[in-house]
Amino acid sequence: MRLKSLVTAGFALVLGLAFGTATAPAASAAGARPNFQMPFPCGQTWTGNSSASSAHQSYEIDFNRGSTADADYGDTVVAAAAGTVVISAHQGSTNGFGNLIKIDHGGGWFTYYAHLSVRSVGEGAHVNQGQKIGEVGNTSKPGNNISPHLHYEVRTSDTTYPANIQKAVFNGVTFGYPAQTVTSQNCGGGSTNPYTPQEVCGSGYSVIDSAGLGTAGTVYLLYNSGNGYNCVVTMKKTSLGTPTATTAYLEVKGKSRVTDSGNFGYYAGPVRASAAGTCVKWGGKAGSNTYDSPFEHCG
C-alpha cells in the first residue's frame, strides 16, 4: 500500500464549525463498519480539518485543540475501535507520517494515526477501543517541519489507494467535512460487541451451539467441517472495551481441557481443538455467570 508524502503543513485548527450529520454508508466490498469513536479520551473536544493540508487526498483529518500551535503536543491518542496493531514504527524518509500506528479492525477496515510524538503499543498488540496508543506530536520525514497535530485516516481493503480512504464516522455520525468540532464519546467501548464468534475463531467456522451468560455475555461452540476442529469463544455484552474476568474452555473427551481465562475487553478465546467424531464439553464465564455443558456434539 502506497502512503502519501506530506508537504510542510501549517497549524490545522479551525474553530466553531459544525457541518452535517448524515450517516456514511460502509464501503460495499468491506465488512460491516466498526462503531468508530473519536481517537481521543472521553469528553475531550477537538477540531478536525480535512482541507488545510495540500497533501490530503480526500477524507483524511488533521485534529487539534487549544489556542496555540503547541497546545496539544503530548496529548493522549486512543484507539477509535478495537483491533490489532499492524504498524507501529517511525516511517523515516519513506513518507511524511513520522511515528505511525495502523490498526486492523477486521472486515477490511483500518485506521491510521500519524505524526505521534510517542507510540505506546507495538506491532501485534491487541488494543481495546479507547486504549491509549500514543501521544500527539509533529514527527515527519527529515526537513518536513509541521505543527503538532494528529493525522487520522480510515481505510478499507476493497479498493486501491486513495479511493480506499473512507469518510470518518464517530459514534455513528459522519464527520462534518471539511471541518467540524467534535466531542469524544470514546468512553469505554460501544454498546455492541464489534466482533462476532466467526471472526474470532476464523475462516471456515460455523456456530453449532451457544449458551447465555445472563446479561454479561454468551459462550459459543463452533465447528470447522474442513479440518474437524471445534472452537469456543465467550463474547461479552457488557463492560465492552473494559478488561473484566472472562473465560472460555473446550475439553475433548479423553484429553485435557484447554482454557483461556483472564481480563478481556471483548471476548475470551478462541480455544480450538481437533474433535471430529468425538464428544466435547465446553463452556465459559462472563461476570458472575457460568455455563458448563455435558459431553455432547459427538458426531
Image (cartoon, rainbow, N blue to C red):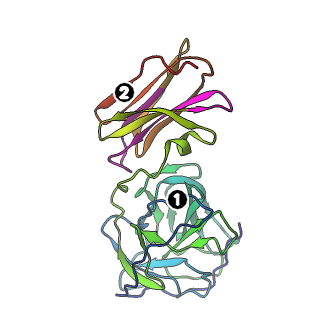
Give the residue furthest to the top: 254
Q: Nearer the viewer, residue 21 or 68?
A: 21
Return the x and y of residue 175 as percentages of the image width and height. Answer: 44, 77
Relative to 157, 238 lies left or right: left
- Quarter-of-image position of residue 54: bottom right
Vertical position of residue 18 compared to residue 109: above or below = below
What label sits on residue 32 in the rendered view? 1
Residue at 60 percent across and 86 percent down: it is 8
- Quarter-of-image position of residue 245: top left
Q: Nearer the viewer, residue 32 or 260?
A: 32
The residue wearing badge 2 is 291
Return the x and y of residue 165 as percentages of the image width and height. Answer: 60, 72
Q: Earlier in the sequence, mark 2 or mark 1?
A: 1
Residue at 47 percent across and 54 percent down: it is 82
Q: Amino acid at mark 2?
A: Tyr
Whether residue 187 appears in magenta in the rendering, the answer is no
Return the x and y of residue 143 as percentages of the image width and height. Answer: 65, 81
Report, in whole angstroms, how far the alpha carbon at label 2 lies from the one at label 1.
Answer: 30 Å
What label sits on residue 186 in the rendered view? none
Q: Secondary structure at mark 2?
A: strand
Q: Amino acid at mark 1?
A: Ala
Residue at 66 percent across and 64 percent down: it is 158
Q: Are marks 2 and 1 in contact (CB under 8 Å)?
A: no
The magenta stretch is 223-249
The quarter in which the C terminus is drawn is top right
How dense is the environment of label 2, judged by Cα within 10 Å: few (below 14), some, or many (20 and up)?
some
The quarter in which the N terminus is drawn is bottom right
Relative to 212, 55 lies left or right: right
